[in-house]
Image: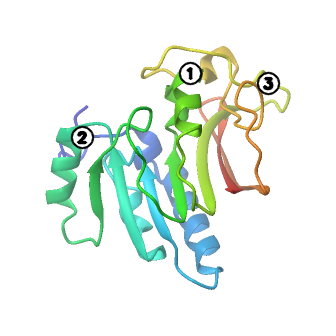
Amino acid sequence: VASPENESPFYSGPGSSDPQIVDPYVETVQRFFASLPTKKKAVDLGCGDFRVGSRIVDSFDSYTACDVVPELILFNRRYWQHLPVEFSVVDLVKDEIPTGDVLILRQVLQHLSNDDISKFTQSIPRGFSYLLLTEHLPSENDFLANKDKASGTDIRLGSGSGVVLTQQPFNMNFKSETTLLSVPQFGGSIVTTLYEL
């Protein structure tokens, strides 16, 4: 998808460019990770055009940015070469996930089928301390979580659902779960949750 600024042939959509969505996220991530005693190693799965990732790199000791699109990763390596980032082609459903301390996924799982999400959750390497997950969820608290869909560009919001890893069929257990941010958007809320692994 062409970028509206024409600075990149890749554009990850309003979730990556709208200041009302991005600015609070960046501030929240910076504030939380600055509060920890040591800087962490981040692995960003589904980094997209890297407009967001580029603004939080400094919050981490190292940063590995991954995406499934080889052409995007090649472009990002050139375009963001001034940043201390390692860009890798990774399919989070099929490939080995790089190791680190913090696993970051911004509005990625919402595009995947339950089967693909399960493959991802079962392949998270040991050693991660945190999962920083952002998903577009319905505004109602009692929505039906994890309604299945085919992997693709659409998300579950249109069918009144959203991804919740602690519910069926994923049933993931975490040491703690903290909602860091909720931004009302497009008839739902873009919710960033910090899970302690």
Q: What is the three-letter code of the residue carrying label 3?
A: Phe
Residue kind at label 2, given as amino acid type? Phe
Q: Earlier in the sequence, mark 3 or mark 1?
A: 1
Instruction: Give the residue number, with chain letter if any, for mark 3.
Output: 143
Residue where numbered disc 2 is placed: 10
Front position in the image: 45 or 173 = 173
Q: Residue at x 63, y 60 (%)?
A: 130
Q: CA distance from mark 3 to mark 1?
A: 20 Å
Q: Earlier in the sequence, mark 3 or mark 2?
A: 2
At mark 2, the secondary structure is: loop
Query: Which residue carries the number 1 mark?
Result: 115
Look at the picture and state if 63 lies above or below 19. below
Which of the 4 image quarters holds residue 43?
Answer: bottom left
Residue located at (57% from left, 56% from top): 126
Question: Dots 3 and 2: beta carbons under 8 Å?
Answer: no
From the viewer's perspective, is the residue at label 1 or at label 2 nearer? 1
Q: Few, some or many C-alpha atoms within 10 Å of disc 2 (few <14, some 14-19, many ≥20)?
A: some
Image vertical order of residue 69 relative to residue 143, above or below: below
Residue shown at 74% from the left, 25% from the top: 145
The answer, for residue 7, to whether it is visible in the render is no
Question: What separation in Å lies between label 1 and label 2 (alpha carbons)?
Answer: 27 Å
